[in-house]
Amino acid sequence: MIVLGIDPGYALMGYGVVEQTGNRLHLITYGCIETYAGTPMQHRLRTLQLGIRDLVNIYHPDDVAIEELFFARNVTTALMVGAARGTAIIAAAEYTDNLYEYTPMQIKQAVTGNGKADKHDIQAMVKMLLNMQEIPKPDDAADALACAITHCQAGRQKEQFRMK
């Protein structure tokens, strides 16, 4: 099974592609789709849409796992990231109906065993679980890999995380 994990973002949208064979995880690729301040919103969203389209067309994921949004403070940022997340969902949905979503706490719990883990703990576990030489950078890409790992670990329980 190949899983595309997505960490929604407006300036940086993290992605990670992981292959699961039995209980083994294999890193395929990771990185970020980047947009730039000062670029009109519609162009930034289009860049994100095309980036996700490219990823699904290149890697042909069986499932796509997207981190749910959690914002407690900045409403403007939440709206912008929500638009970016929606763009990623639409681009992935053009390819497959196998879309799943996980909360940040679920991802932290699955990857580290602690739902309140910090970024460094998550990055260290992603590095270990994927047998990487270095901690994945930037943070957005590491978060996307953690989302993909979470989905792989969900096993038969994954259906409860299917987008409805």
Image (cartoon, rainbow, N blue to C red):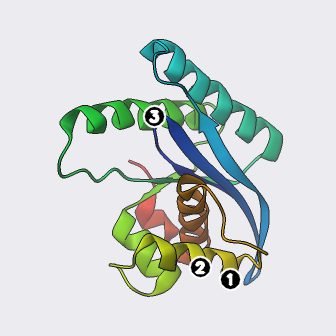
Q: Amino acid at mark 2?
A: Ala
Label 1: how many Cα within 10 Å (few below 14, some 14–19, many 20+): few
Horizontal and vertical percent position of residue 68: 38, 53
Give the spatial CA distance, label 2 vs label 1.
6 Å
Give the mark nearest the N terminus, 3 or 1.
3
In which quadrant will I find the N terminus? bottom right
Q: Is residue 73 above or below residue 128?
A: above
Q: Residue at x 29, y 36 (%)?
A: 77
Q: In terms of depth relative to the viewer, which is nearer, 73 or 154?
A: 73
For mark 3, what is the residue?
10
Q: Quadrant of residue 117?
A: bottom left
Q: Looking at the image, do the residues carrying marks 3 and 2 touch, with CB atoms under 8 Å apart? A: no
Q: What's the residue type where badge 1 is placed?
A: Met
Residue extending farthest to the bottom is 113
Amino acid type for the residue under numbered disc 3? Tyr
Q: CA distance from mark 3 to mark 1?
A: 28 Å
Q: Are marks 2 and 1 in contact (CB under 8 Å)?
A: yes
- Give above or below for 60 relative to 52: below
Residue 44 % position (x, y):
52, 21
Q: Residues within 10 Å of mark 3 (few under 14, many from 20)?
A: many
Residue at the disc numbered 1: 128
